[in-house]
Image (cartoon, grey):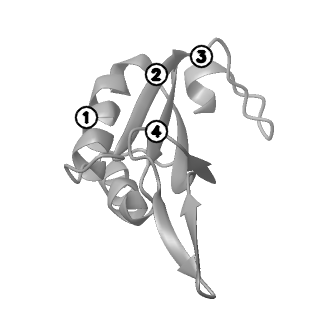
């Protein structure tokens, strides 16, 4: 099992979710986050004062998948989240040692 974490632009969330749903991925967790990277932020005006926004809004997706789906999931996220601009995001794949469905007690792949 693998744990996939993807940081993407918020407006690409629906595209990524639909693409994952099309390949049979049903469960994922979303968190609204802010990040700082090569995109570097931007300046905004508020009540006549200019200020710099360093941390930009992003969405963090977390998905647990069986090993055989990892490459397909990573490819789908990469294709559907890509805009070609700086700040498109990152995908991280980590080993997942154990998973348990609380309601039924199912373990490992069956819990996903």
Q: Which residue is mark 3?
A: 96
Q: Residues within 10 Å of mark 4 (few under 14, many from 20)?
A: few
Instruction: Tell me, yes or no, if residue 27 can be seen here.
Output: no
Residues under labels 1 and 4: Cα distance? 22 Å
- Left or right of 79? Residue 25 is right
Q: Earlier in the sequence, mark 3 or mark 1?
A: 1
Q: For this rendering, which residue is in front, 4 or 110?
A: 4
Task: Locate residue 57: give its quadrant.
Answer: bottom right
Residues under labels 3 and 2: Cα distance? 9 Å
Q: Is residue 93 above or below residue 74?
A: above
- Left or right of 104? Residue 60 is left
Q: Is residue 99 above or below residue 48?
A: above
**Residue at the location (39% across, 64% down)?**
14
Residues under labels 4 and 2: Cα distance? 19 Å
Foreground tag (4 vs 3): 4
**Residue at the location (77% across, 36% down)?**
104
Residue 4 percent coordinates (x, y) = 49, 30
Determine contact: label 3, label 2, CB under 8 Å.
no
Q: For this rendering, which residue is in front, 89 or 46?
A: 46
Determine contact: label 3, label 1, CB under 8 Å.
no
Q: Earlier in the sequence, mark 4 or mark 3?
A: 4
Residues under labels 4 and 3: Cα distance? 27 Å
Of helix, strand and loop, which one carries label 3? Answer: loop
Q: Is residue 4 above or below residue 24?
A: above
Q: Which residue is mark 4?
A: 37
């Amino acid at each position: 099992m693998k744990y996939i974490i993807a940081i993407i632009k918020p407006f690409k969330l629906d595209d990524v979710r639909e693409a994952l749903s099309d390949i049979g991925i049903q469960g994922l967790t979303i968190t609204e986050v802010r990040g700082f990277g090569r995109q570097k932020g931007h300046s905004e005006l508020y009540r006549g004062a200019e200020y710099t926004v360093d941390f930009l809004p992003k969405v963090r997706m977390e998905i647990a998948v069986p090993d055989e789906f990892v490459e397909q999931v990573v490819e789908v996220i990469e294709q559907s989240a890509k805009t070609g601009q700086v700040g498109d995001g990152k995908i991280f794949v980590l080993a997942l040692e154990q998973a348990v469905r609380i309601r039924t007690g199912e373990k490992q792949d069956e819990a996903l």
